Image: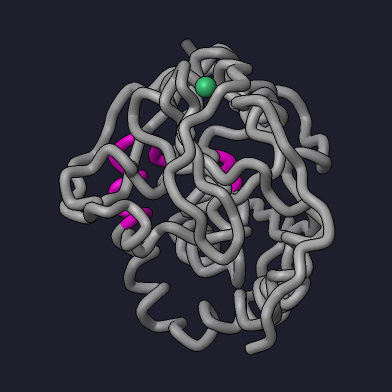
Amino acid sequence: MSKKVIESWDKIACPICNGTTFTDLFTKDEEPFVECQQCSLTMINPRPTYASILKGYTKDYSQGYINKKDKKIRRAKRRIRKMKKIIPEGRWLDIGCSAGFILSVAKSANYDTYGIEIDPLGVKYAREALRLDNIFQGTFEEHHFDDNFFDIITLYDVIEHVQDLNKIVKELKRVLSKDGVIEIWTPDIGHWRVPEPLIEWRAISPSKHLYYFNKKTLSMLLNKHGLKIIKKRFSLKPGLQVFVTHK
Ligand SMILES: [Zn+2]
């Protein structure tokens, strides 16, 4: 693999508390991992510009999912069985839907499904191989769905990748129906099984995982925009799995 060359960097204030003082934690692949001194959000800062980050997403990204189709379908079935107990029907948006396996199972379970994905390969597979409608290519923040439109919105391993956290959460608030639920999965830096030193954690991923939440920092971000965590699912792995509603 050739050594990457990062041409330009973005230095940002903390997206949760606007803090500008950070504690240096470590550097991996030349990217500095820091912790906000005010709210404790861990993130890469400064980080490569978003244009260069996007270049790093190769075709393998969705192809990896397609290759593991059977496993992904089984996992999707488990997730949908659990969701049925919370919201048994309605419009379901999966953000970062990749090849569409979640939506394919959700559609069979009578949900009205929508998906959005940056990777054209995932979009093509979802539309053609899985015959899903309402699959959009691009970012959720730029799509402009109608107000109060979705009963369920899922972000599985997505929020740690997004460029502008405040923009996406504001948009989630706007498109979520009055009694709707958002399910968010993201690595949990507060989990007891996160290794010491932190750099050895598998979730540490330069240019990919830009933020590392715990329940407190994710709550703060959501609260800022009128959303709240109503339930955190127990997980043996260092993953944060939460359900979110309007405040
Ligand atoms: Zn902060």
- Name the one closer to the observer, 44 or 72: 44
Residue at image coords 52%, 41%: 43
Q: How many marks?
A: 0
Looking at the image, is 164 positioned above or below residue 19? below
Image quadrant where residue 164 sits: top right
Image quadrant where residue 192 sits: top left
- Name the one closer to the observer, 52 or 137: 52
Q: Position of residue 118 (x, y in %)?
A: 74, 61
Q: Position of residue 45 (x, y in %)?
A: 62, 41
Looking at the image, is 124 positioned above or below residue 196? below
The N terminus: image quadrant? bottom right
- Name the one closer to the observer, 67 or 84: 67
Residue at image coords 51%, 38%: 152
Say if the magenta span includes residue 221. no
Looking at the image, is 49 positioned above or below residue 100? above
Say if the magenta span includes residue 92. yes
Q: Position of residue 97 (x, y in %)?
A: 60, 60
Residue at image coords 46%, 22%: 37
Residue 199 seen in the figure = yes
Looking at the image, is 25 positioned above or below residue 1? above
Q: Position of 145 compared to 122: left or right?
A: right
Image quadrant where residue 121 sits: bottom right
Colour pattern: one colour
Q: Position of residue 16 (x, y in %)?
A: 56, 22
User: What segment is highlighted magenta in the picture?
Assistant: 79-94
Residue 175 seen in the figure = no
Residue at image coords 57%, 45%: 44
